Every structure is written in C-alpha cells, then in structure tokens.
Image (cartoon, rainbow, N blue to C red):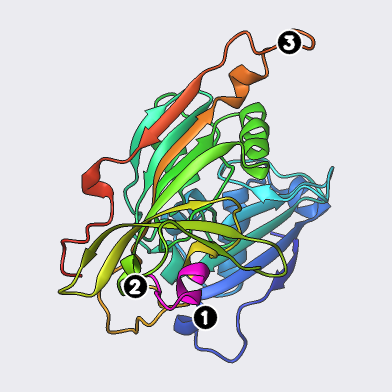
Amino acid sequence: MPVNKTCSDTQGESPTQSQQKFEWHILITKNCVTEQKNCTAISVLENYGHGHSISLSKAELKQAISKGALWLTPAKNKKQTQRLRRVKKQLLVGDELHFYFNKEVLSAPVPQALLIADLIDYSVWYKPYGMLSQGSKWSDHCTIARFAQQNLPNERPAFIVHRLDRAATGLILVAHSKTAARALSHMFEHHLLEKHYHIIVHGDHNTRPQPEVIEGAIDGKSARSTFTCLAYDDVTDRSLIKVKIDSGRKHQIRLHAASIGMPVVGDRLHGVADANEQCNLQLCAVSLRFVCPLTAEITPAGGKPLIEQEHFFELPEILKPQLSLRL
C-alpha cells in the first residue's frame, strides 16, 4: 500500500525489543486511496506493519486502538489531532495516522472506579489508587474519563475538569458535555466549591496549632492549606488530618505536609517512603460541596438563580484512609 512512512521505533534493537515500544507516523497518499477500495485505518496499519516486519495481528491492532493508541490528523484540519477508535474509518488523501504502541502501557490492568452519583450532565466517581486522571499519547484505557465512558448507561462523552494524582484516591467529577465541562472548569478555576481531603502523616500533629494554616508558594504561585488533626496513633506515630485547600497547586498538600516535617505516609516523591514501603499514598479527596453551576446559570437578567441546587458528596468511611490500619 503506497503511503509516505515514518517509523520511529528504536534503531539497532532486535525485532522482539522493538515490538515492546514504537511509534508510526503515516501520511495517506493519493495512490493509497485510489488503489484500495477500502482505505481504512486498520488496513493501513496492517500493511504498514508487514512492511516493517512487525508482526501485530489484526486483533492486537484493534485492541491497541480501543485503548487509545491511534490518533488521526485530518487533511482538512492539521491543527486538530484526535484519538481515533473507529478501525474502519475511511481515510482521505493528506490524512495522517499516528500509532503509538507500548506493550507495557497497553497491558496495564484497569483499576476499578466506583460511581458515586450520575447527574446526567456530569458524574461523581471514587478514583482508586493507580487510576489516571488523563491519558497519554500511548493510551487512555486506565483513565477515569475512559472508565466513565465505558461504564455509564447510554455511553456519553467524558471530559476531565480537575485532577487527582495517580497515587491519590477520592472523589472526582467527570463532565459529559462541553457545556458542563466549561461550567465545572470555571467552578474549579475560581474556587467556587469546598473540598476536603484526609491524609495520614508521620508524626503527632496535635503538637502543632489547631487548625494549622500553611502558606507557602508553589512554583511561584501562592498556596494555602488548612490542616486539622482528627486523631493520633502513638503506636505508629502517625496522625489523621483533615485538609482544606484554598488553591489547587500541583502536589500542594504533599508539599505543605512535608514542609512542616510531617510528610504524607506513602509519599515516595516528597516524603520519607522508600521502594520497600508497601502502603499506597495516604491522601484521599473525601468530600465535595458546590452549587451546580448549570442550575446557577439559569437566572433572570440581574436576578438570582431561578433554581439553585447545592450538592454535597462524601465518601463512605470504608473508602477513607484508616489510621487504625497498621500500614
């Protein structure tokens, strides 16, 4: 199949090694379209693989595509590269396919999220440890957005409006329309909601002021967290703390906890955990309270909302970090 080809798998490796991780960039030519009755994404990839002696079966290609490994840059809009899951998508002259294969990434098991509430325009989920908030060019099958898409009734689009670290757990919102995504993103950007987290830290936080307000710039931007000790276990010398943040900087809670000498248990990045410590990061988003931004927009000129619906979501105790457990 005549196509302009760019293969960027690592040169000098054995075929077995190169099949672990590689990427293809394929420009569809006029000859490709005219010589093939069905110039589809899957047929182009099959032929391309045969030409490079990379033996991926059609089933393997389809599975990789379903997990988000294929992207399309349409000829009509070169600035709009998007994931492509339709294996029988008819390609046009000038289209570009980008296929990213990483065997390790694609074989990763999908963590199981738990639906807390389905509000149609958006949903609330419990994100478990190891689940991603957003995908990469290699895959999106382990993300909360893709999980929501595949597990809600009447499959809907899914948009991420805020994030939780891969190592963190807790409540996360997923929007199901562009309108909802804009409204919810605005709510988070302007801090029009109340979020609480629970963390378990090393040390006795009762020895510090209660509540303790921690202010320290992160990446040059102001950040403020309020820590309140809920309990202390003298056997493990660990404290359970409720955290309220007034900003949403990257790793804010973990950095602020480490800054007072009480790093979050299981924090291998900013804390004292090492590779031998078996417990996961003890940081969990336990509650969300907000006025639905979609109902808040239904207002008469200059007046108050006709409908103002407040939501409060809290995780059941069993899903919160447990100080009583010997981590």
Q: Is residue 167 left or right of residue 31?
A: left
User: Which label's residue is closer to the chain start, 1 or 2?
Assistant: 1
- How crowded pointer 1 is (Cα within 10 Å; few <14, some 14-19, many 20+) is rated as some
Viewer-nearest residue: 209 or 53: 209
Discs 1/2, front: 2
User: Which label's residue is closer to the chain start, 2 or 3?
Assistant: 2
Q: Which residue is at a point 59% across and 58% down the rendered structure image?
A: 224
Measured as percent of width and height from the top left, residue 39 is found at 67, 46
User: Would you name the residue on which mark 1 appears?
Assistant: 18
Give me the C-alpha separation between circle 1 and circle 2: 34 Å
Asked whether residue 226 appears in the rendered view, the answer is yes
Measured as percent of width and height from the top left, residue 291 is found at 55, 26
Give me the C-alpha separation between circle 2 and circle 3: 49 Å
Are the residues at dot 1 and dot 3 in contact (C-beta closer than 8 Å)? no
Above or below, comparing residue 313 to residue 299 in the picture: below
Measured as percent of width and height from the top left, residue 198 is found at 36, 54
Tell me which segment is drawn in magenta: 255-265
Image-quadrant location for residue 189:
top right
Q: Secondary structure at mark 3?
A: loop
Image-quadrant location for residue 38:
top right
Residue 303 badge:
3
Residue type for callout 3? Gly
User: Would you name the residue on which mark 2 appears?
Assistant: 266
> Quadrant where the C terminus lies?
bottom left
Discs 2/3, front: 3
Q: Which residue is at a point 58% across and 63% down the rendered structure image?
A: 250
Residue type for callout 2? Gly
Q: Is residue 75 left or right of residue 129?
A: right
Residue type for callout 1? Ser
Above or below, comparing residue 184 to residue 235 in the picture: above
User: Which label's residue is closer to the chain start, 1 or 3?
Assistant: 1
